[in-house]
């Protein structure tokens, strides 16, 4: 019988391997699955390719994962924030690769990965340096850029409410990349504030249908990542 | 091409039961219209299967009971259905993202013809006078991880449906994994057909005589 | 100030012109905006290209529009139903064109039209007669077909609940093509069972955000199209 | 390149007000981070404007009042905001479908440089030591129907931001419709710049002297 709820972060992250592609939801701190990321910092996996809109702030969450030298490459649209210190340093030292993708193209490439679309054309980035090496094509007298799908081995996603089937609800603008990252992964790992019984989520309101979700971890009191950043806390393993 | 009787082998309910035995606990399943729908009645106790219907529902339940039909709750065959607790509705682009994106585990489809290479023809007989209609069949065969075919072994007129090469227009090429008929269960592996199970009273020789394609034991 | 609610079907359909491309929501009768379609039958517009999953049943709704010789071409996945009589006859007589598209490709082409994606690749219909004349391309050793976006001049859509901004909720599987057809139109015309005040729809539950909707017509007691078909009624103008 | 004083022409709040006057009732608007955000404060009474923020909200309201901030309700600039009654949340692919699909009427952006052809550079100074970051700027300029730029006319060091040809990396080519600066409002038409309105005390000659690109009256 189906029950995707797991009991521990360790169980949630089972199977993550060196060199895996990992998508991480969130737009800045909103929607960032900080507890799952910290559990990943605790694991001995390296050379990850991370797909996320940003590259972390302060020394927690994604920034902690990068600071712990677990990420070899990041695919994102905006790796710079007012308080991003970790990524800039590693990037300038040539210790981490960056694939910079316009935000809408990033979203569409992830959605394509989940939807079985290997590639699509978009007008975004035409005539800019970001499309210099990309294939172009004219449709209806306008030039478009060919963009390829992105899939992940694992997606780490934060939501608000989940049931045992993996049906998910999100909270406000913390939804952002969550639903499409759930679609694009071989294994989707979700941290939720609350697990409810099957049937408690109105089927009309489901944002992510359970088919896109593999494992659910209840984290009833997730940290407010923006506060951790503001307090300049550093996550460096289970001693945090 | 030989004998075709409903009195030998399995009846189609028994065939549906055979399919059901091969559907694992927790599977996401799409059942084609018609005979494939029978499969849902035979899922063994203790297994939970989630049914997807491509018109926008995951967690399809039983057919609606009389008087409780909602004309806006239908399945792909346009029958009035119900939804289980824990169901989800979504629009067509999302629904076919589930299909095309490889998220559905098993699809059970009917067939006009299946070839020994696993090619499937189930959308058109090529009759020039017929109104062409394809629906979601071509999306399902390329997108769903495992395609099972359930069909009478032969047509009513006794023609083999399991053929060397499909003469009808293809739905997809090399897409079928297993064929369940009233005579046998047949695996498609490396573009060859292998008998997995024979129905009671059906011998290999009888089966081969009643099958255009080459069968392997 | 924004108020997309119109008072009459005539006002709702204002501006529909000969030769327009019109998308019509619905999967069979579920989600078919039958009152809007009948209002279109009442209008003197011809040579329409209709995009819809089916081609109508009986002599009402889309079948009535076809029977009234207003449709020159239909783009759909399944023009055949147990009780479709109008389309088959005209098609056999060569009086209507058909572009047959696999259902998922149809949905994705419509979604692409709304999302600013001119074309995409899909595996659907590879190695079949439906892709014979289409461009192919290999990605990751597999062959895919290039498919182009479909946009409409007008989309006619049925929903359950709307507010004045055009935020929409649907009912069960009547949702089907509605949300993507709203996205793909220059002008989206929606019939709703109920108009509610702005704010009554929880922003987390909105299925179609108002930006995709132009006009809203309240039809409190829409006909059950499947009953009209079963009763073999014929819509031939306002006398119905 | 000439004088650059905050004491002449309009202040940036006045410029934002000028932009606001050009936003029609019922418009769907996306405001860039920083100075463009000022525009929302000046929409004339009687006009209703719906704000889109690309991180997943249509119907963005005012900045959240102190103590009522929700860390999961932010705008593209990561400020704590509110939502109006009638708002809608959605995911990133849907949000950028609104942008790329041409559904948003007006986007107001800041600029490093705008060329006389309407090319915009606003995402990178090309500094090799800077961390490259693009966000949604390139999606907005190709997708939104009308792109307005609001900017100081010149840089702090007095260099013209309105140039013959952008030296900074482009965000988009031929994308800007109108430029609002502290000195003037300038239309871009057929790859030429036309003065639409001069700020009080600003003469055409003064403006041209302080602008690299050729201006037309």
Image (spheres, coloured by chain):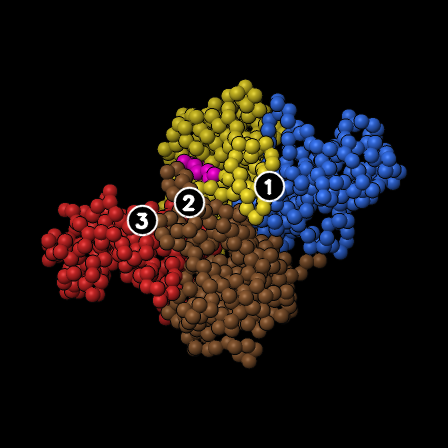
Chain colours: A brown, B blue, C yellow, D red
Q: Of helix, strand and loop, which mostly describes the magenta segment?
A: strand
Q: For the point 29% across and 50% down, which residue is it?
A: D119
Q: Which residue is mark 1?
A: B139
Q: Which residue is mark 2?
A: A136
- Comparing C19 with A199, the one in front is C19
Q: CA distance from mark 2 to mark 3?
A: 15 Å
Q: For the point 31% across and 61% down, which residue is it?
A: D125
Please provide percent x and percent y for residue D150: 26, 56
Question: How many residues crowd around disc 2 within 10 Å: few (fewer than 14), some, or many (20 or more)?
Answer: some
- The answer to whether residue C149 is magenta is yes
Please tell me whether mark 2 or mark 3 is closer to you in this view.
2
In this rendering, is residue A161 above or below B200? Answer: below
Please provide percent x and percent y for residue C205: 49, 54
- The answer to whether residue B1 is magenta is no
Which chain hosts label 2? A
Instruction: Give the magenta range.
Output: C148-156
Q: CA distance from mark 3 to mark 1?
A: 38 Å
Which chain hosts label 1? B
Q: For the point 61% across and 65% down, which residue is it?
A: A17
Q: Is residue B60 left or right of residue A106?
A: right
Please provide percent x and percent y for residue D112: 28, 59
Q: Residue furthest bottom?
A: A239
In this rendering, is residue D201 above or below C75? Answer: below
Please tell me whether mark 3 or mark 1 is closer to you in this view.
3
Q: For the point 47% across and 23% down, which residue is it?
A: C69
Which chain hosts label 3? D
Q: Are marks 2 and 1 in contact (CB under 8 Å)?
A: no
Do the residues indicated by labels 3 and 1 lie within the same chain of the protein? no
Q: Which residue is mark 3?
A: D173
């Amino acid at each position: 019988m189906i029950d995707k709820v797991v009991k521990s972060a360790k169980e949630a992250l089972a199977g993550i391997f060196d060199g895996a592609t990992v998508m991480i939801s969130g737009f800045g701190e909103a929607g960032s699955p900080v507890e799952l990321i910290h559990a990943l910092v605790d694991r001995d996996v390296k050379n990850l390719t991370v797909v996320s809109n940003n590259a972390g702030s302060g020394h927690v969450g994604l920034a902690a994962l990068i600071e712990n030298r677990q990420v070899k490459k990041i695919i994102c649209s905006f790796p710079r924030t007012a308080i991003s210190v970790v990524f800039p340093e590693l990037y300038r030292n040539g210790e981490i690769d960056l694939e910079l993708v316009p935000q809408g193209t990033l979203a569409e490439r992830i959605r394509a990965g989940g939807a079985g679309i290997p590639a699509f054309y978009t007008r975004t980035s035409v005539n800019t340096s970001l499309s210099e090496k990309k294939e172009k094509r004219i449709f209806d007298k306008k030039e478009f850029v060919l963009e390829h799908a992105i899939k992940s081995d694992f997606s780490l996603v934060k939501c608000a409410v989940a049931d045992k089937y993996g049906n998910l609800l999100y909270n406000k603008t913390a939804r952002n990349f969550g639903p499409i990252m759930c679609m694009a992964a071989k294994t989707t790992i979700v941290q939720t504030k609350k697990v409810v019984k099957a049937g408690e989520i109105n089927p009309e309101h489901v944002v992510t249908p359970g088919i896109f979700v593999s494992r659910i971890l209840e984290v009833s009191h997730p940290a407010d990542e923006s506060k951790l950043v503001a307090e300049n806390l550093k996550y460096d393993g289970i001693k945090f | 091409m030989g004998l075709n009787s409903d009195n030998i082998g399995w009846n189609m309910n028994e065939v549906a039961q055979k399919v059901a035995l091969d559907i694992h606990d927790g599977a996401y399943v799409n059942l084609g219209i018609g005979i494939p729908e029978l499969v849902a009645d035979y899922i063994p106790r203790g297994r939970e299967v989630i049914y997807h219907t491509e018109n926008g529902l995951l967690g399809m339940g039983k057919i609606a009971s009389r008087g409780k039909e909602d004309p806006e709750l239908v399945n792909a065959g346009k029958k009035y259905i119900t939804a289980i607790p824990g169901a989800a509705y979504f629009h067509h682009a999302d629904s076919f993202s589930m299909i095309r994106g490889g998220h559905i585990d098993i699809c059970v489809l009917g067939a006009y013809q299946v070839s020994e290479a696993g090619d499937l023809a189930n959308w058109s007989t090529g009759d020039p006078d017929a109104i062409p209609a394809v629906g979601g069949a071509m999306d399902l065969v390329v997108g769903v991880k495992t395609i099972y075919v359930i069909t009478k072994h032969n047509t009513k007129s006794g023609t083999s449906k399991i053929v060397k090469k499909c003469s009808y227009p293809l739905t997809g090429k090399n897409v079928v994994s297993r064929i369940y008929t009233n005579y046998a269960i047949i695996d498609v592996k490396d573009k060859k057909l292998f008998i997995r199970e024979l129905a009671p009273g059906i011998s290999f020789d009888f089966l081969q005589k009643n099958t255009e394609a080459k069968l392997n034991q």
